[in-house]
Image (spheres, grey):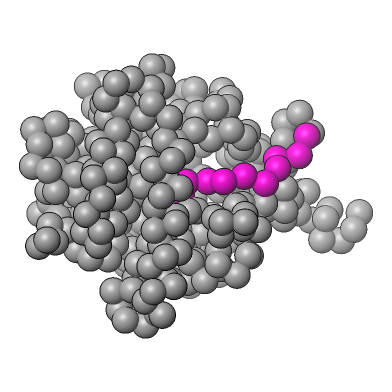
Amino acid sequence: MIPKLSKTYYINFSSDGQKIGAGQLGPSDEDGIPMVNYNERYRTAGLRHENNVPFGVHYTPVTISIYAFSLLQGIVDGNAATDSHQDRFFQLVDWLVRTIVPISPEAGVWQHSFQIPFSAGLSPPYASGIAQAQAISLLLRAYQLRADDRYLAVAHQAFGAFLVDIDDGGVRCIEGGLTWIEEWPSKPRSHVLNGFMFALLAIYDYKKFFGTDAGTELWVEGLRTLTHNIEFFDSSYGSRYDLLRGLVVSETYHQLHIKLLRELYQLSGEDALLEVAERWDSYLLRDSSFKRRSLAFCENMLHNPEYRACKFRQIIRRFGC
């Protein structure tokens, strides 16, 4: 078939895939499906469960999709042992096919069965907009390699959750006439920036692949939401993770925000997205890394008690107090 989408993904996840494949995030099961050790990951970050119980080791669709994207990058680039990488790639895709959970005849989600910090009214099981998004983009590219109709069927199910409100088990939120796809279905809604932009990439892929009215309408609605709200994520020296707590993100996260904005500009032609991407890029040139980190640390410490608690626990852990 003639590919309708780029063969690889918008973000190159090769380095992330190497960490996942090497077991740095957690073990793999007997089928080679990676898991995440949240006990260690959150302990290192100074985070703890509100009920003081272990977070556990879990499958996460985002981790599995990122690993698959990294394998796909190697296959397309010709830098991988194609047969073994393709086998592993399709094992990961097939895991997504097997594990989607229907929430209606037209929609399905990947359920997360564990608690996360900063959950703001979130309780398992719950769906995640970023998990839905990356899986959609992955399934459509997998179909371009192997025309398995199951991949299209599950992509349709996953997209269906974009049209279902959070309170009904989906990942959509409508506030003030604007449509958000939420990374986490928190209460109140958090509007995580990177999760929403990944969702927009998936919506674009879906509308381009299938040419549906639903995909086109949601693409237009999502771009409207992003352009109307992007300025609220600007800290004047970096960018914010969400609109609930407003934490200023690390430099790596900030660069991801810029990359996603540039990709969405290329797909949409929205000048406002390019303008913000270039402004946020200028912060990296204007200020030293030390100054940006110091400003973010002070602002986050001042305005977010959960962030303060995490940092204090990190200090205690570091010095063995």
Task: Please report the residue visible at 14 percent of the width from the left and 48 percent of the height from the top.
Answer: 209
Label the magenta part by its dominant secondary structure: loop
Dividing the image into 4 quarters, which one contains the N terminus? bottom left
For the record, the magenta segment spans 53-62
Q: Position of residue 223 (x, y in %)?
A: 19, 41
Task: Please report the residue visible at 27 percent of the width from the left and 30 percent of the height from the top.
Answer: 160
In this rendering, is residue 174 above or below 262?
Answer: above
Residue 243 shows in the view? no
Q: Nearer the viewer, residue 309 or 80?
A: 80
Dividing the image into 4 quarters, which one contains the C terminus? bottom right
Question: Magenta includes 56?
Answer: yes
The residue lying furthest to the top in this view is 168
Task: Please report the residue visible at 55 percent of the width from the left and 67 percent of the height from the top.
Answer: 21
The residue lying furthest to the bottom in this view is 79
The residue lying furthest to the right in this view is 321
In this rendering, is residue 138 above or below 119?
Answer: below
Q: Position of residue 202 (x, y in %)?
A: 26, 46
Task: Please report the residue visible at 26 percent of the width from the left and 50 percent of the height from the top.
Answer: 148
Question: Magenta includes 156?
Answer: no
In this rendering, is residue 278 above or below 186?
Answer: below
Q: Quadrant of residue 84?
A: bottom left
Q: Nearer the viewer, residue 142 or 189?
A: 142
**Residue 5 shown left or right of residue 301 in the figure:** left
Q: Nearer the viewer, residue 99 or 6?
A: 99
Q: How many marks?
A: 0
**Residue 226 shown left or right of residue 111 in the figure:** left
Q: Quadrant of residue 9?
A: bottom left
Residue 102 shows in the view? yes
Q: Position of residue 132 (x, y in %)?
A: 37, 40
